[in-house]
Amino acid sequence: MSARALRVACGQGFWGDRLDAPVEQVRRGPIDVLMLDYLAEVTMSILQKQKARDPAQGYARDFVPLLGEIFPDVVEKGIRVISNAGGVNVAGCRDGLIEAAREAGVGGRARIGTVTGDDILERLPDLVRSGHELANMDDGRPLEEILERVESANAYIGAAPIVAALERDATVVVTGRSTDTALTYAPMIHAFGWAWDDWDRIAHGIVAGHVNECGAQASGGNCLVDWESIPDLAGIGYPIVEATPDGPFVLTKHAGTGGRISPAIVKEQILYEMGDPAGYITPDGVADFTTIRLEEDGPDRVRVHGVKGRPRTGQLKVSISYRAGYKAIGTLVYAWPDAVAKARRADEVLRERLDRLGLAFDQVRTEFVGWNATHGPLAGPPPEDLPEVELRVAVKAAERAPVERFTREIAPLILSGPPSVTGFAGGRPRVQEIVAYWPALIDRAAIEPGLEVEVVEA
């Protein structure tokens, strides 16, 4: 990797992103690092359930065949791949990568690094007994209240084990619940030799990771600014961070790809998932987003500089998911004339029938899609000439039985409710278990990342 510039390309912004994006990043121009972000809070619980059903699962399965396709490119070009695709089964993901590397003909030339230690699900009882309260950051409740219902628990690990893997010449580094931003700034720390207390440089890396992590959202996708004029959304190029040893970086994309990189679009991404802008906290430092400076650096190039940082905190964030009851969602579509009035009446009839059955719900929520579902009370009175509106009713309960009965009360409205109903397809609504999110903090010393790097045998 060059000591003067480092090109870190994003190939995935979430599990389910475009499968050809990372292939294009590798093949359409020079890059040093391919970063792929697969995990969100809810994803961890999904992966944990998959692993419970099949111990061989629990990681982003798309990742292995993707690497199988690009392994020859990665090895021949000296590209490093860093991803949190390991989910809750990093070892299973590693085994799949080893097999894919052999099949791709890069045995003896590829090294797989795996980072573990973030998954603390089995440790939770001992941690609670030893005094780690893991209180909910939103309401202060101790974890002990819901301990028996926990589905997953993962600490956000920082850049140190990824850097260590790169120092050991890993071709691919796979983690579990690494903080998203570290997937971008870890290779910067490695390439430029930044000190772990060089807070301003690390803050630049944090901002680079934040901009890079959501893929095409930083290059014109899902943006409000002049969205109608974004060129070639069908062939949108994913972002690339051109990092420098001093910290400032340029966000760009491969030439000839669709989308747009502009200061306004980068600003939108910077504001994404923003809490306190003066204190964006990661495991490796705190970035002050109020100090960020942006300037155009040519077509589809934005320079980011001026970022100030502060020391890291003594705690790590823990993402916990737990079982929180059951839900179901039912829909019907009502046609003109008086579409909203018909849907409202259907909602009243449905609620009265549920009351007569004596069913107890924690929540019953109604939305009228086409009128107020997006903006709620801000939508104002419904237009009189709406051609159609979708009635969407959702219920939530601690037990499955009342939710199951609710699913049987939607279809009868077709013949025993207001007229002009349509759109009932797919059969009875499905009962789903609710997985709730429990954010917590834990002392940094309680989390010990593990690292293995092994050569793929020929």
Image (cartoon, rainbow, N blue to C red):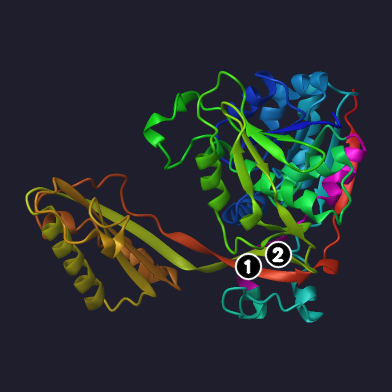
Q: Residue 60, how many percent across, how many down?
A: 65, 41
* Quadrant placement of the C terminus: top right
Q: Residue 337, how many percent across, how many down?
A: 6, 50
Dot 1 lies on which element?
Answer: strand
Q: Residues within 10 Å of mark 1 (few under 14, many from 20)?
A: some
Q: Which residues are magenta?
A: 148-169
**Does residue 53 appear left or right of residue 83 in this picture?**
left
Where, by quadrant of the figure, is residue 261 drawn?
A: top right
**Relative to the observer, which residue lies in front, 228 or 124?**
228
Of the image marks 1 and 2, the number of the one nearer the N terminus: 2
Q: What label does residue 170 carry, if any?
A: none
Q: Is residue 458 visible?
A: yes
Decide whether residue 158 is among the magenta residues: yes
The residue indicated by pointer 1 is 439
Dot 2 lies on which element?
Answer: strand
Q: Residues within 10 Å of mark 2 (few under 14, many from 20)?
A: many
